Amino acid sequence: MNSDSATYRILIADDDKNMRSSLDELLSAVGWQTETVARAEAVPPLIPEFQPDVILSDVRMPGMSGLELLSSLDQHTAPPIVLISAHGDIPMAVQAIQDGAYSFVEKPYDPRRLLTILRHAAEAYQTSNDRKRLSLRLANLSGLDRILLGEAPDVRAIRDDVIQLSDSDASVLIVGETGTGKELVARALHDLSSRSARPFVALNCAAIPVDRFEEEMFGIKGGGKGHLLSADGGTLFLDEVSALPDQVQAKLLRVIETREFIPLASDTPVQINLRIVSASNDDPEKAAADGRFRRDLLYRLNTIVLTLPPLRNRREDLSLLFAHFVQQSSLTYEIDPPEMTQDDVAALLAHDWPGNVRELRSVAERVVLATRRGQGSVASAIGADQGITDMPGTLREAVAAFERELISKAVVAHRGRMDAVAEALGIGRRTLNEKIVKLGLDKDSLL
């Protein structure tokens, strides 16, 4: 059996019983799922139910012909049609192709050629459907858009990486400070993948007592099935993975290598099929160097590493993110979104955001709640967690401080190549020079 063809489904329409039987046997022998009908009129009602990848239809049949069937279907949504006929000629073949047929085959047919044509048609249809499904998922995706909203270069790169990696089964390690959105990125990888219909199981490795970890992870015979089995077919997300106990690290390494595990109190291995995505706000390499984390396990988990930028490094996105969270909270609490003042913008730019996007969302919610009481500001909402020091007195001062920091970082990153600095900042070289003079920056001292 050709395993590459095993997933293809074909709907055959031919009024010749012997021909239907012959085609059915040929395609079943190579692993296709088949459905046969004697009339073309029976094809359209079967498409939603059987969901064929390709339709093989005779041209001349009582009632509706194969060409009429072709013209009756929506070419944008219907599976490709391959026409077959003992009465075919070149003008008929040309007309069929012009009308939208995928191909035209004459009887008696060459089995190998027919199988090749049908396989290519089915592959093209499945590829087209995969693109449509991906576009729909992207359009409906909320977690990735919510946590990675913005136009900072690092954020755009992460969005692209997530989309590219979504349909891979490679292990992904997400590194970033607390509150940067590691779990939501992991969920986006799952939601965009072919595993999206299966479970996404999140496990906080730092929150489970050591003496219960193995039972939680592997399950126990006659008891709970454990997180590994719960995630079978889907994605297991190991948050704070560097907190894994030593004895569990060795067993998890074996699970990754063999795709099986043995529940506690059992002697029978259990096979699983899952993708592992892990995350850490600690440096896994340092944990391995310190002997707190097995290096061989790290190499299994970090096939791909995604590093999420802290919010302080994407200040150009602060106002956009804050407005987004304010709008969300305003909908929740059923009030009109409060307008941002100059002092609010100054407070956003002055704060260092140690809690990252999670902290920003919390501050936005506090501002909305305070607005319901007729009071509140960004500065007071931030001050609920900690005092604000060294805050610029005006919006102009805050913007100047922000520009000074941004330009300084760009000069260092591009080693003083000012054309590259201007391009990275999205401004002209002349504008850059004017800002450097106005802000009193000394390029040489930065390098």
Image (cartoon, grey):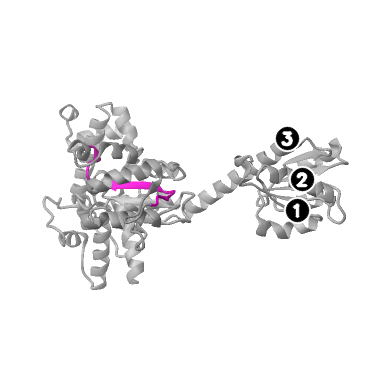
Magenta stretch, residue numbers = 268-285
Residue 271 numbered mark, or none: none
Residue type at tag 1: Thr
Residue type at tag 2: Leu
Taking 34 as reference, is 343 left or right? left
Taking 350 as reference, is 86 left or right? right
Q: Disc 1 marks which residue?
A: 36
On the question of residue 149 being in view, the answer is no
Q: Position of residue 439 (x, y in %)?
A: 19, 38
Q: Nearer the viewer, residue 396 or 259?
A: 259
Check contact, mark 2 vs mark 1: CB within 8 A. Answer: yes
Extreme front residue here?
A: 267
Q: Residue at x 29, y 65 (%)?
A: 338
Q: Position of residue 254 (x, y in %)?
A: 34, 43
On the question of residue 323 being in view, the answer is yes
Q: Nearer the viewer, residue 356 or 211?
A: 211
For marks 3 and 1 on the same chain, the one whose residue lies earlier in the sequence = 1
Question: Is residue 355 shown above or below 93?
Answer: below
Q: Is residue 295 a member of the stretch shown in magenta? A: no
**How far apart are the two marked residues, 3 and 2, measured between alpha carbons?**
12 Å
How dense is the environment of label 2, judged by Cα within 10 Å: few (below 14), some, or many (20 and up)?
A: some
Q: Nearer the viewer, residue 424 or 89?
A: 89
For marks 2 and 1 on the same chain, the one whose residue lies earlier in the sequence = 2
Q: Disc 2 marks which residue?
A: 23
Q: Disc 3 marks which residue?
A: 112
Q: Does dot 2 land on a helix, a strand or a loop? A: helix
**How far apart are the two marked residues, 3 and 1, measured between alpha carbons?**
20 Å
Q: Position of residue 367 (x, y in %)?
A: 24, 64
